[in-house]
Image (spheres, helix red, strand yellow):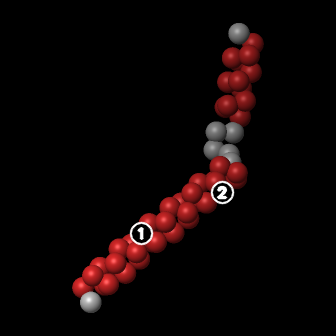
């Protein structure tokens, strides 16, 4: 019972605190996905250009 109250007190202490590690991890994932999708689009355009020519 004391553990639940302690966890609730810790959770309610700063609900809007920015987790910098989580934010940087999310930014890295977004960057990697953007580069990956850009690479796929570039490859598709290069392939279609080669196919048409």
Between 51 and 43, the residue placed more toward the observer is 51
Location of the C terminus (image quadrant): bottom left
Which residue: 51% across, 69% down? 35
Q: Can you tell which quarter of the image residue 6 is in? A: top right
Q: Secondary structure at mark 1?
A: helix
Which residue: 66% across, 57% down? 24
Q: CA distance from mark 2 to mark 1?
A: 24 Å
The percent coordinates of residue 42 (x first, y second) are 41, 77
Question: Which residue, as the protein is rendered here, is positioned at the far left?
Answer: 52
Give the labeled residue for mark 1: 40
Location of the N terminus (image quadrant): top right
- Is residue 40 rendered to the left or right of residue 31? left
Which residue: 37% across, 81% down? 46
Between 6 and 37, the residue placed more toward the observer is 37
Number of numbered discs present? 2
Which residue: 64% across, 54% down? 25
Q: Can you tell which quarter of the image residue 45 is in? A: bottom left
Q: Secondary structure at mark 2?
A: helix
Q: Can you tell which quarter of the image residue 5 is in? A: top right
Give the labeled residue for mark 2: 24
Instruction: Please determine whether, in this image, residue 13 is positioned above or below residue 2.
Output: below
Instruction: Please determine whether, in this image, residue 29 is positioned above or below residue 12.
Output: below
The percent coordinates of residue 22 (x first, y second) are 65, 49
Instruction: Please determine whether, in this image, residue 20 is positioned above or below residue 35.
Output: above
Instruction: Please determine whether, in this image, residue 12 is positioned above or below residue 33.
Output: above
- Is residue 30 rendered to the left or right of residue 38? right
């Amino acid at each position: 019972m004391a553990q639940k109250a302690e966890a609730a007190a810790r959770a309610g202490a700063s609900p809007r605190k920015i987790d910098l590690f989580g934010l940087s991890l999310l930014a890295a994932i977004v960057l990697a996905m953007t580069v990956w999708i850009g690479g796929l689009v570039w490859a598709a355009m290069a392939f279609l250009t080669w196919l048409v020519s």
